[in-house]
């Protein structure tokens, strides 16, 4: 785990020195708070937690994908990844180290969302479980995209459309039964189900999210090995 810790420390320093990435972890809950206070609380026709669940879903399902992809692609562009591979850092060590800080930051942001929302204790538990697991899926998906990219520009070009598709598909699914059936395999759809209906069971959605994580991790490992074989 020493290698993973070293990568974690490196990623933390890189992220803390990049204000654009840090803003993402602040802007989503900030918008949720402002809209809740100024709009939802003053309008009885708007659900009290509408903006909290909306911004939380967008954050977990879209924002983290491009952020993680950019971080990995930056390592590739700077040749940092090449040195880590030569040093014997394994795929899982690099993934844990790189994704660890993003997940930590994502967890803190998820807790902030929960504090803004008017949730019961049981609802808060469900909310945090699906948010943190969903954030992990987004981060690993982004890491896989970044690993498949040659540079940050390529990572953004690939990551943004993917993030938009998986992020907006659950919204479209609300109005189209066919899309809803297809969207069931996406972790973003499971996030959407739970945050919008806390009476729904969490076991099946969590299994789908974990299955997504397993698939994304496989893509990442394959791409990491291919990167190592090229040099």
Image (cartoon, rainbow, N blue to C red):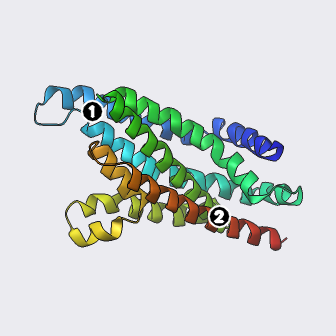
Neighbour tally class for label 1: few under 14, some 14-19, many 20 plus, Cα within 10 Å: some
Which residue is nearer to you in this view: 225 or 1? 1
Where disc 2 sits, the SS reads helix
Q: In which quarter of the image is residue 181?
A: bottom left
Q: Check disc 1 and report the residue beneath it.
A: 35
Residue beneath disc 2: 220
The answer to which of 128 and 95 lies nearer the viewer is 128
Spatial separation of the CA atoms under disc 2 and disc 1:
37 Å
Above or below, 168 against 133 in this view is below
Asked which quadrant contains residue 145, the reply is bottom right
Residue at the image point whose x is 37% and y is 33% from the top: 124
Give the left or right position of residue 53, taking residue 48 as reference. right
Residue 19 seen in the current view:
no
Residue 14 against residue 108 in the figure, above or below:
below
User: In which quadrant is the N terminus drawn?
Assistant: top right
Residue 32 or residue 3, whichever sits in front:
3
Percent x, y of residue 206: 44, 52
Q: Is residue 74 left or right of residue 186?
A: right
């Amino acid at each position: 785990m020493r290698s993973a810790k070293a990568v974690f420390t490196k990623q933390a320093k890189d992220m803390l020195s990049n204000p654009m990435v840090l803003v993402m972890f602040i802007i989503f809950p900030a918008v949720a708070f402002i809209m809740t206070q100024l709009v939802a609380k003053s309008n009885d026709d708007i659900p009290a937690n509408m903006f909290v669940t909306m911004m939380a879903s967008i954050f977990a399902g879209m924002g983290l994908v491009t952020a993680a992809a950019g971080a990995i692609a930056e390592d590739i562009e700077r040749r940092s990844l090449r040195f880590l591979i030569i040093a014997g850092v394994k795929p899982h060590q690099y993934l844990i180290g790189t994704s660890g800080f993003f997940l930590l930051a994502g967890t803190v942001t998820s807790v902030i969302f929960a504090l803004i929302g008017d949730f019961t204790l049981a609802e808060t538990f469900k909310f945090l479980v699906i948010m943190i697991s969903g954030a992990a899926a987004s981060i690993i998906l982004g890491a896989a995209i970044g690993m498949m990219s040659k540079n940050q520009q390529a990572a953004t070009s690939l990551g943004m459309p993917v993030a938009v598709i998986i992020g907006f598909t659950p919204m479209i699914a609300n109005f189209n039964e066919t899309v809803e059936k297809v969207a069931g395999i996406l972790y973003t759809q499971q996030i959407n189900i739970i945050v919008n209906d806390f009476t729904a069971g969490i076991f099946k959605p969590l299994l789908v999210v974990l299955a997504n994580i397993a698939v994304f991790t496989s893509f990442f490992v394959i791409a990491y090995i291919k990167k190592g074989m090229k040099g």
